[in-house]
Amino acid sequence: MTNRLPITKTYKLFIGGKFPRTESGRSVKVCDASGAVVAHTCRASRKDLRNAVEAAAKAQPGWAGANAYLRGQILYRMAEMLEGKRAELAGAIAAVGGISDEAARGEVDASTDRLIAFAGWADKYPQVLGCHNPVTGPYYNFSVPEPTGVIGVICPDEPSLLGLVSLIAPVLCSGNAAVVLASESNPIPACVLGEVLATSDVPGGVVNILTGLRDELAEHFASHREIGGVLAAGVSADHRRLLEAGAAENMKRVRVLGDATDFGDDAAMESPWQIEPFVETKTIWHPASA
Amino acid sequence: MTTFQEQDATHTNGTSAVGPGRSPALEFASAWDYAPTPESAKVEIADRYGHYINGAFVESISGDVFETINPATVETLSVVARGTAEDVDAAVKAARQAQPRWAALPAKERGKYLFRIARRLQERAREFAVLETMDNGKPIKETRDVDIPLAAAHFFYHAGWADKLAYAFGGANPEPVGVCGQIIPWNFPLLMAAWKLAPALACGNTCVLKPAETTPLTALRLAEVFDEIGLPPGVVNIVTGDGEAGAALVEHPGVDKIAFTGSTEVGKKIAAATAGTGKKLTLELGGKSPNIIFEDASIDQAVEGVIAGIYFNQGHVCCAGSRLFVQESIADAVVARIENRLKSLRLGDPLDKNTDIGAINSAQQLGTITRYLDSARDEGLTRHEPNGCALPDKGYWCRPCFFTGVQPSHTIAREEIFGPVLAVQTFRTPEEAITRANNTPYGLAAGVWTDKGSKIFEIAGRLKAGVVWLNCYNRFDPASPFGGYKESGFGREGGLQGLRGYVRL
């Protein structure tokens, strides 16, 4: 019997609920610790980013308009799907080496639990971040948090799955749409997550996943005028400056998590203060008189 | 705007019997000569003011000065130190040095200083009101009834937060940011100082405040209050000057946070300058706020809201309702009433208690407004300027006006004018109103007028604006967060959410 040649997969991008190849036709090899190719991923271009932003902008109002209970249930459904893909995701995390199978399984579990936490926040964070304001005078006055819009999410290299999920869960839970740039050193878990999303109830375009190079794409995340905010972790000081300078283009809300961020710290990472940076407080006044 | 509405009550009653489309003539301005009722309080103004650094008034290290004038008379009020990078450096050092001890004070004690500031402001309110009117040009009834009481209220409100911050940030551990550089505009000089300083101090930060070049005097008088109440030296430092001092503050490595209120253009420069520095940033920027009137609104009330929305403070208001959207079916009636109402506004001496419209703050701002009026003329728009008040001989003045036939592409429908200029547009359906209201890079405020509850909340929810006034406009309160969506900036001032910009979690 001859040795069977394994099929190495070429992962595609995830944009608007579909899996297009990068329009640039470029790809990146992903190798294991021995240097053997385990997969190819797309090297997304600026045009792919634009397409992803367009899909996100189109999907965002509907996602924000869905009631909070429903958004919570969809995030919970996403967690269920993750649980079902536990083995594949753990394999993807471990594919490039440097992490034990056990640790990879632990990372999948932590990611699933993180989604569960934010599934629960969806219909509660407005009660924590919003309030009634006791103004002087006969007015009824209250403040509500609303999603910023389309958020660019630039993931750290490590942890490849937990980093991504920790960044997108608070962004999605309030009704934002996300355009994600996956871990550069191991984009495979992000690609598998895209496949999970495609079969979950998350509407197409609410999460879009690009694979590619931060050096190429960070500046376009920074300058794109339809991106309302950028959340990044594990980026260099240069990229941080570049992203923050992007705020000057259209007053993006930019949040860069420091290198000391511990994605395993449940109390910190599942706090409503992870949601708060990408909501806008709307304050509404109405006279109160008979 | 309180005064607008109070005073307007009689007019509103007088006109409410008149059906839509008819325009009762109420030419108060020309028919009745009001006797002058000048504010009698005298206020002492020193010939010269220095910066307030580390608890003392000091000259600029360079010795540079500039004049601050009364825009209603063009008379010089005083000569003020012009700050440079060296003065900013001294102020930042003083703030840096004072910060650990200020933050380490028992929180309730820290709050007590703010309570004291609020009290002294209330006690000296009349003096502050007169001084503000002289330095800024805005009517005394506004400084008396709005600017100064609200400034005091801001200190009072935030005083109580000092020892309750843990409750504001449930589950997190709020820490002060450190030294805050705060740059404020000339349209509400003392009130903006209060908006910036009160939350910063309550959260345990120390401050370097840069008042606007044309309106430094009330901030410097506030420094006298700090002295009076024994605020520790260095906790608040004030450097007067122009953009040079502001830029030096933004770039100073000893500053942990920049809070800026002003134009979107400068806000973008500040965002670029602070990128990658680790400085926290909150920005309250420009606006082109929509005020939407539906056919089922109470029209008299709505017209009062339009007037208060755009002509309050000569239109020098970032959240001014400068884009009026009127449902087509009532457009003629609304325009007729605005026209009529404008006739009864009294423009003139800001120190006169009957004055509704004061002086434009500076020659520069008058130039900006004039350029926009010219652009509207060049683009073929019809200008309505029914107010018949004679413009005073001296000073900077602009008659309140509005334009009809405005399309979204017209310059005055897109750009912030910061003057008493209203662009009137019409719409047919709620959907169209929402789309057009949101069709702007700005997102500071919005107004909606309809008596239909379900409609008003649907529209409030869909407007992309940080403050939405329903059946009212231009209301402010220390407990109510203020700040914008999109290019109107980020961060809030006032209320619980306003504390967020002054803590690290």
Image (cartoon, coloured by chain):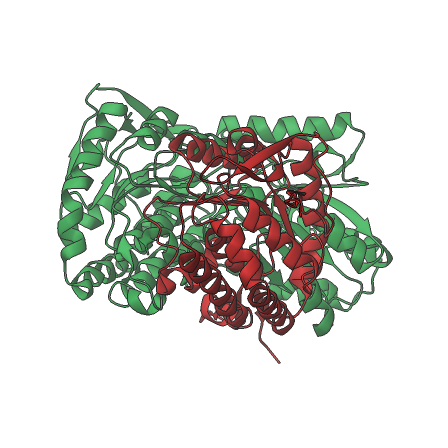
Chain colours: A red, B green
Q: Position of residue B336 (x, y in %)?
A: 78, 52
Residue B263 can be seen in this image? no
Give the residue at x 51% y 69%.
Answer: A116
Give the residue at x 38% y 64%.
Answer: A266
Q: Is residue B80 left or right of residue B340?
A: left
Q: Is residue B154 above or below residue A208?
A: below
Residue A236 can be seen in this image? yes
Q: Is residue A286 left or right of residue B111?
A: right
Residue projecting furthest to the bottom:
A290
Q: Where is residue B486 in the image (x, y as percent from the top left)?
A: 58, 45
Q: Which one is in front, A245 or A117?
A: A117
Image quadrant in which the C terminus of chain A is located:
bottom right
Q: Where is residue A194 in the image (x, y as percent from the top left)?
A: 64, 53
Q: Is residue B84 left or right of residue A231?
A: left
Q: In this view, does B40 lie above or below B389?
A: below
Question: Looking at the image, how many numbered discs can be counted on the residues?
Answer: 0
Give the residue at x 63% y 64%.
Answer: B470
Q: Which one is in front, A55 or B243?
A: A55
